[in-house]
Image (cartoon, grey):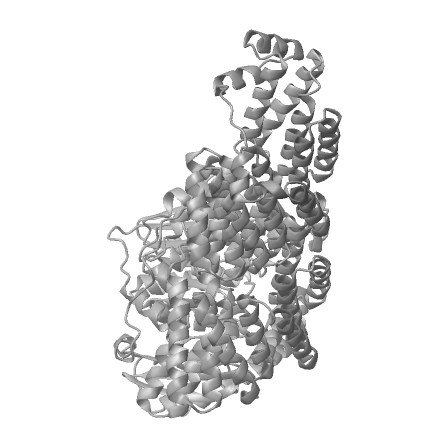
Amino acid sequence: MPDDDDSDISPQIIESLLAQPTVEQQSAFLRSANLLDAGGLLKLLDEAAYLAGSDPGKARRLADLGAEAAQIIHAPNVIPRATYIRAQTHAINAEYDAALDLIAAAREGYKALGQELDALRTNLGLIHVLQELGRYQEALDAGKVILDNLEAASQPEAAKASPERGLVAATAYQNTGRCYEQMGRYDEALAAYAAAEAIFLALDMSDRIGDISNNRGIVLLSLGRGREALAAFEAAASIFAEADLALFHAQTQINIGDAHLLLGNYTRGLEAFERARRLLAPLEALADKHVLLLDMADAYLALNLYAEALAAYREADGLLQAAGMTHDRARALWGMGSALIAQSQFEVAGQILAQAESLFSAADNTPLLSSVLLEQASLLAARGDRGAALTTARRALTLVSGDDWPVQQVYAHIRIADLLLPNTGNAQAHLREARKLSDRLALPHLRARLNQRLGHLHLLLNQDQEAQKVLQTAVDEIEQLRGILSQEMARTSFVRDKTAAYEDLVQLHLARGGEENTWQAFAVAERAKSRALVDLLTGVVDARAAIPTDPELAAQLQLKQAGLESVYNELLSGQGKAALSELYGRAVKLEQEISRLRLQVTAAAPAPAGQFDGPLTPEALQQQLPSDAILVTYYICGDEVLAFVGIRGKLKVARRLGLASSAQKLAQKLAMQWERFRAGPGFVARHMPQLEQSTQRVLAALYDELIAPLETIWAGSTGETASPPKLVVVPHGILHQVPFHALFDGKQYLIDRFEISYAPSLTVWALCQKRTAPPARKALVFGVADSLIPAAAAEAKAVAQHLDGVTVRTRETEATLAALQAEASGCSVLHLACHGLFRADNPMFSSLRLHDGWLMAVDAMQFELSGALVTLSACESGRSQVMAGDEIIGLTRAFLGAGASTLVVSLWLVQDETTMTLMGNWYEQLKRGTGRAAALRAAQLSLKAVHPHPYYWAPFVLVGQR
């Protein structure tokens, strides 16, 4: 609802006036300023109208004051003006019902005064409010009333003769253009904006060109013309910033963020949203705050941060529904449905998408309706109904084929091709059409998705050269997009839905056969493993940038974290009044809110240096292979498990070891074996032989799939030596849950024959080997005992006996978060014996319990532990969620990211007393000069001799430096 007048009342007068506490004192002030008459009050309201663009709350108070003063001095010609400005401020604050009532009152007031043009002008506000409520035809009808009445002034030359009437006509064009845009009628929107711009230029109103530039940019964005849109938004932002119009400036920053997202500049997009948040924070502008929340949810979804996106969409949906903002609510439902599909919540996703379809259909918004149909097609395919999915996707394409909606057309062609493959003939036509359209758009993220499909198509057609070229381009584009992200969380999640290009390249190289192609395949597999973790370890991304500098954000984080720690305490004790399901629900909600706040904190983080550009060529990887150990790097292609085996600089590959789905079932069975120990010591003692046998059966099945086929590859390289051969295991996907050292061949466990260590990737392993301990020998040992783990303090003291320069913290006043944060940095050895809590829903919130609170994984990354040996003697401290891209998320990632060279962590719940024994033996071995992996093996074998069930001796694994 833009206004067209300026005012010469100083800001100081406004501030002093609003500071008056009573109506009488306000009237006295107005009188002293010569403003307590109709002319003075109208000037005051001109100022209020201007303030609506920079401080709508202040504008509302000024309009309220003007209306009251007009009543006092009996100035009826002032009241409609005040009423209309009040309507404008209510609309800005998403109070649309109140705005409609005030617009109607203002119109009647103007009519009573015989001010027909001003009465007609109220339709400008009416268009805006009706459009926000999704009542598009009524909004267009209101615009038509204006343009029909002002037909003579709706042309640029005629507008010069009657500037006031021309201004109303131009604004009517502008507002109806916005309505057309929300209906997906982009050509009509652009035509309306062009008509408005011509009149504004004829009237020499360059200040209004910022509005038009902003509006036009939104349409260009919808058409996929991101760079043109960004240029339009930046031009508008410059105008609004110079005019100190904070509200319009904030709106434009939101649009700038959207443009950057479309162009794949995700960090810049989040930066723009953060600028918008700060501009909006002091303003009474709920409508734009709701839109900002929605657009941030879109950003999280684009970055595959599904939990954060879903939480933001749900919050936005509630706010938008309450405000009646139909168009934006439909967008929220669409995004929510997409996030739910990504999380495999298919039933709820179907219900949500049906609501979005209904709203966009009612609005006759063809392009966005098509987009929702494509999501529904994706849902149908995920549920196994490819026929219905294909029908729905074709309907989506038909909807947008008649007009210039290239973005929706590209996505429709890609979706149809996905559903048609492996039928290459029909799919090829759709992918070619998608390529033709995408070449016009220059959208990197879209191009990367398309190149992956085209590469896969070439692969199916046995066109190896073309496939390699296109797939390599797709991988390069994906890594370029990821490389400009400054948020560690975002870099980690970004490749989540983009691994198919890597898998196809691996398959392509392996199908060619030969040692050179095996190395090429291995290099691609290595590029697909834990790349964001590599960036973290090499300093490309600084996790410490997540420390909040904004006091408001810091306070919110502190409050949310305190609430989360309270929930964790209840979960651990099991004595809270709330049901476990309710506690987990509260934990998830708080974790998501904290994650979103942390993303806001990192939005202002410095741009990354790109990404780790260390050697990933076959030649360089060959140099990284351990010279004294066998390297086994697993990789999952589709459902196939394969392994690359590196021995003395040579590399071999073992194909079709088993199925990932089979390994997952076995891992689940193994987890059930560990769960049996929760039944209590009496049950365990009575059934120990059966428990051991059933566990060995599962471990033997895993051995048969994952190790037995490799025995012939390394046969002869593990000859008789004084020490056992060394094995470095790099798992992939579900295999991160497998305790390889405990795999059973029917007679022996693998640990009986090998000294075993683990790593997330060869590159991470090599980086850990290069890390050196701090020159000062400084050890820090925490033992946080309670009734559930009474031996933790004794463990700490037993460990400390074997360390030099050690500080031990076991008392309630000593073993605290503050003490750990103050003393951990610079340690060469850090040992934490305490409770652990693995959070499967949000693994970076997996935590270690100290006496006064919880150390979360996300906070552990703030430590400076360069080159340290870190032991997390806690339950499930080594469990991680593994994202596509093989990014391990949890405490392991956190402490490696903090600088640890070696990390010893547990894969399941550990027994208190046997853990104390194991740790004491391990550190004793270390003191004797035994290597880290060899020392852990010796301690585990010693414990195995007394407690042969793997539950007791096998939970701990060594990651990193041996």
Question: In the rendering, at what x and y percent does residue 194 appear?
Answer: 52, 50
Question: In the rendering, at what x and y percent does residue 597 appear?
Answer: 52, 46
Can you say whether 299 is above or below 473 in the image? above
Frontmost residue, 392 versus 353: 392
The residue drawn where x is 45% and y is 62% is 492
Can you say whether 9 is above or below 297 in the image? above
Q: Quadrant of the N terminus?
A: top right
The residue drawn where x is 25% and y is 77% is 623
Can you say whether 566 is above or below 378 in the image? above
On screen, residue 104 versus residue 651, left or right, reads: right
On screen, residue 398 versus residue 477, left or right, reads: right
Frontmost residue, 811 versus 440: 440
| Occupied quadrant, residue 384 | bottom right
Question: In the rendering, at what x and y percent does residue 833 appear?
Answer: 48, 54
Residue 11 can be seen, yes or no: yes
Question: In the rendering, at what x and y percent does residue 256 appear?
Answer: 46, 50
| Occupied quadrant, residue 751 | bottom left
Frontmost residue, 427 versus 468: 427
Frontmost residue, 927 versus 280: 280
